[in-house]
Amino acid sequence: MPTLQNLWYTVAMVLRKILLRITLWSLIAAAVVGAVAVLFYPETVAWKVIGTAISTACAAAVLIPLLMLVDKPRTRASGFVGAAALLAIYVLDMMMIWDLCTAFGTRWRGYEECLCTIGSILVTAPPAMIYLFGINTVLGRIAGFVGTVLTAFVFICLVVLSWTPYAMHSTLNADVFAGAVSAAGAMATAALLGAGTDRRHWRWVGVATAAIGAGIVIYAKFRGLNESNGTVEVIFSIAIVVAHANLAEVCPLVGRQRLFGRITILFTAITFVILDIMAIRHWEDSTGMLARSAGATGIIASFCSLALIVLAFINRKLETVRVAFESVKQYTVICPVCATKQTLPVGESHCCKCRLVIRAQFEEPHCPKCNYVLLMLTSDRCPECGEPLNNAAAPGGY
């Protein structure tokens, strides 16, 4: 495996150099051909050559960081998806530049279908890359899987919508499916972040309400029900509040910062409660005290949420330590029988000289009360819940 990995790194470096040269020469070709076209051939194929050169340069430039993602195991799937999306966009762009998309319909329908497909890729590819990265993390494993599946479904709906005649749109309702699933999926995946690693079981309320809200929207569309009595707004607001609360709890906050996170959750909940009251009353007080109160609490909640993001970046070293521990695959040990120093893999192995069976397991130290990771902690109290720590839970106790 190390040989294959080194081979891939070598190939990736060569590809990056080639892509840089393609970007450079494509820009030069676009400049030269563009100048010639303006002077002598204002309405010829030269303009298509210019568009091809510019598109090739842009595609090559974007592909370089995507290949860098492929270099790392945790981001490899995201890099491949991004590269595939970029290739599809490039092919569709070439089809439009060279009038090849007219084979799929009339001249303007062919262009419109290709443009809509490019838009579908641009809308769904970045979330898919984020979800695929989440699958390879502890906190985002479940959320990443669910998000990937839902994003694939939304992409299929959008592509179907792009390549079917207008007359069939009202029958297929692909736009309704795509909109409802994408909105509910964003709320559900935010609520699922950290699932399986903590005891925040109230997150399932957000997942359930997001699914119920999407189901009601789809059902109402099929039955032709356009008037709302505020039910959908209330259901989706619950999902949003739960998703926001889960994201706030997932933020790597320490000490009193946790209180600030809960204050943010409180103001967010108050904002949506006020909005729900207005929705039930059919927005009759849209310019009165309720509307002003919702605006005030919404501003506070928004800026507090931004502050949580800043605090999360400040405390990002806590997550870095955790990732470093997860990457431990081997350790160095001196055999107690033959005194041979050697490097062994984690798990069961044997001494390379005397064949002594050696079993090794490494675990992060956790707070006995809230299960917070205490690796590399220098304090005698848990930064999450303030629980006093004994020697068994001290740093290095694994």
Image (cartoon, rainbow, N blue to C red):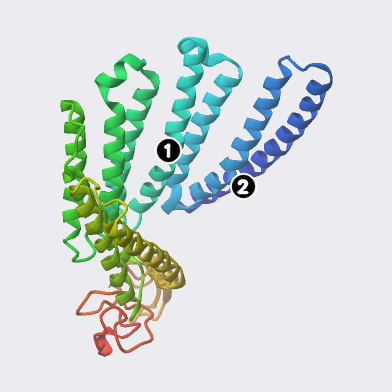
- Amino acid type for the residue under numbered disc 2: Met
Q: Is residue 275 above or below residue 19?
A: below
Q: Nearer the viewer, residue 246 or 91?
A: 246
Disc sitting over residue 13 in the figure = 2
Of helix, strand and loop, which one carries label 2? helix
When asked about the image quadrant of residue 214, the answer is: top left
Residue 62: horizontal and vertical position, in percent? 58, 42
Q: Is residue 28 above or below residue 388?
A: above
Name the residue: 28% across, 50% down: 187
Q: Is residue 260 above or below residue 110?
A: below
Q: Nearer the viewer, residue 195 or 105?
A: 105
Residue 209: horizontal and vertical position, in percent? 17, 49
Question: Disc 1 designates what residue?
Answer: 123
Whichever of callouts 2 and 1 sits on the residue coming sooner in the sequence is 2
Q: In the displayed image of the protein, which residue is found farthest to the right?
A: 39
Residue 15: horizontal and vertical position, in percent? 61, 41
- Asked whether residue 193 is in view, the answer is no
Name the residue: 26% across, 44% down: 184
Cα gap from disc 2 to disc 1, whole angstroms: 29 Å
Name the residue: 80% across, 23% down: 38
Q: Is residue 275 above or below residue 396?
A: above
Q: Residues within 10 Å of mark 2 (few under 14, many from 20)?
A: some
Name the residue: 77% across, 25% down: 33
- Amino acid type for the residue under numbered disc 1: Val
Q: Nearer the viewer, residue 224 or 245?
A: 224
Q: Nearer the viewer, residue 52 or 34?
A: 34
In the rendered view of the protein, which quadrant contains the C terminus? bottom left
**Which label sits in the foreground, 2 or 1?**
1
Disc sitting over residue 388 in the figure = none
